[in-house]
Amino acid sequence: MADKTIKVTLVKSVIGTKQDHRATVRGLGLKKLNSSAQLEDTPAVRGMIRKVAYLLKCEG
């Protein structure tokens, strides 16, 4: 499972969201709007993505 990756892009601003959601977005390596990150496909990362899915676009 280590060779699979997911590309996530921040498509909605974190302004007005809960503090822990903002921390989750930072934990995914996203800072600014439209920034992207290639992440390893693990259950922990999938859980983080699921938590803030309304802010993200996922590929792969």
Image: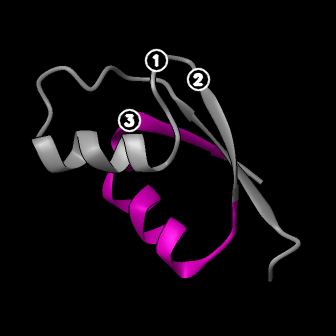
Q: Residue at x 39, y 40 (%)?
A: 26
Q: Amino acid at mark 2?
A: Ser
Asked if disc 2 and disc 1 are in contact, CB closer than 8 Å, the reply is: yes
In the rendering, at what x and y percent does residue 23 appear? 27, 45
**Residue 55 numbered tag:** 3
| Circle nearer the viewer, 3 or 1 | 1
Is residue 50 located in the magenta-colored stretch of the structure?
yes
In the rendering, at what x and y percent does residue 24 appear? 33, 50
How many other residues sit within 10 Å of disc 3, few (<14), some (14-19) or many (≥20)? Answer: some
Location of residue 57 with respect to 15 vertically, above or below: below
**Residue 35 numbered tag:** 2
Q: Main secondary structure of the magenta part?
A: helix
**Residue 32 numbered tag:** 1
Location of residue 10 with respect to 41 vertically, above or below: above
25 lies left or right of 41: left
Q: Which residues are magenta?
A: 40-58
